[in-house]
Image (cartoon, rainbow, N blue to C red):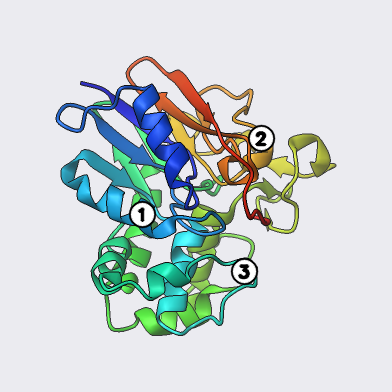
Amino acid sequence: MSTYAVGDIQGCFKPLQALLQHIHFDPEKDTLWFTGDLVNRGPESLAVLRFIKKLGKKHRIVLGNHDLHLLARARGAHPGWQEDTLDEILKAPDRDELLRWLSEQPLIHHDEKLGFTMVHAGLAATWDLTLAKKLSREVETILQSEKADEFFQNMYGNEPAQWDNHLQGFERLRCITNFFTRSRFCHADGSLELGNKGKIQDGNDLIPWFKYPKRANQTLNILFGHWAALGGETHTPRVHALDTGCVWGYGLTAMRLEDEKRFMVACEKGNLQHD
């Protein structure tokens, strides 16, 4: 009985199947965690969603920015990007069922027994686990409410970049969402820098969110994806990067949580765009 955390799939269904074969995944005994960005830019997002949904209780998911973008597009809150590969989902006969299931997923997953916390991109430096779970629930509540349309219409944007407990309304929700699903670098004051998607050495005076001094969540074992340029390396204790650029033609990675052993399969380069 094993638990595997899998990095960003982004519609790369065949590499996912190859990875599961490589780790000898047994759906009767094993559980899969997914760091988000299940869909988009890759060729088979619909197959990915259908497969993971059918896993039932044998999976755990956190939402990524591409997953939220899919939900926004489905509600007409965004016209879509040229690089999107979401039309197959939006035209599928089971789209409503899939999107309803996706919208019920959280932004953070914590397992006390295994001792791991999973997010898509990162956490604000001032968030401990209790606060992060509370803020995730605020967004989850909106996603499953009558205000979901309004949320998606206000979701896009880089401001406010600095977390403040006194933020209200859609500015508060946008800031929470950006920290959970878009974090890479931050400034010395802890505010997000969302324009730089490169390697750590490309950050100049910027700080990777997980290297911020005295962050309130530094005792957590954190699993995250989103930042393919890291190549799966953080060089930071208890911080595990799992996005190894499958959609870019590099690899899809899983980490077995019981012993932190990593497994990877190579991916073929397809119709790839910026993440």
Q: Which amino acid is tagged 3?
A: Pro
* Image x and y of residue 160, in percent: 62, 69
Q: Which numbered disc, 3 or 1, marks the residue closer to the eye?
A: 1
Mark 1 lies on residue:
47
According to the picture, the residue beneath numbered tag 3 turns out to be 160
**Which residue lies at the image location 54% right of the left edge and 49% below the top edge?**
124
Q: Could you tell me which quadrant the N terminus lies in?
A: top left
Can see residue 213? no
Which amino acid lies under the numbered mark 2 shown in the image of this protein? Leu
Which of the two residues, 116 or 66, is positioned nearer the viewer here?
Answer: 66
Q: Looking at this view, name the residue that lies furthest to the right.
A: 204
Q: Specify the quadrant of the image occupied by residue 33.
A: top left
Secondary structure beneath dot 1 equals: helix
Find the residue positioned furthest to the left.
28
- The image position of residue 53, as x and y in percent, is 25, 53
Rendering coords of residue 182 (x, y %): 58, 55
Q: CA distance from mark 2 to mark 1?
A: 27 Å
Q: Amino acid at mark 1?
A: Ala
Coordinates of residue 93 in the picture (x, y in percent): 27, 74
Assign a secondary structure to mark 3: loop
Snapshot quadrant of residue 102? bottom left
* Quadrant where the C terminus is found in the figure: bottom right
Badge 2 density bin: few <14, some 14–19, many ≥20, Cα 10 Å: some
Residue 74 numbered mark, or none: none
137 or 163: nearer the viewer? 137
Task: Answer above or below: position of 88 versus 275.
Answer: below
> Marks 2 and 3: which is nearer the front?
2
Instruction: Mark 2 or mark 3: name the one nearer the start of the chain.
Output: 3
From the viewer's side, name the closer residue of 252 and 230: 252
Q: Which mark is residue 230?
A: 2
Task: Please indicate whether residue 249 sits to the left or right of residue 129 in the image.
Answer: right
Foreground tag (2 vs 1): 1
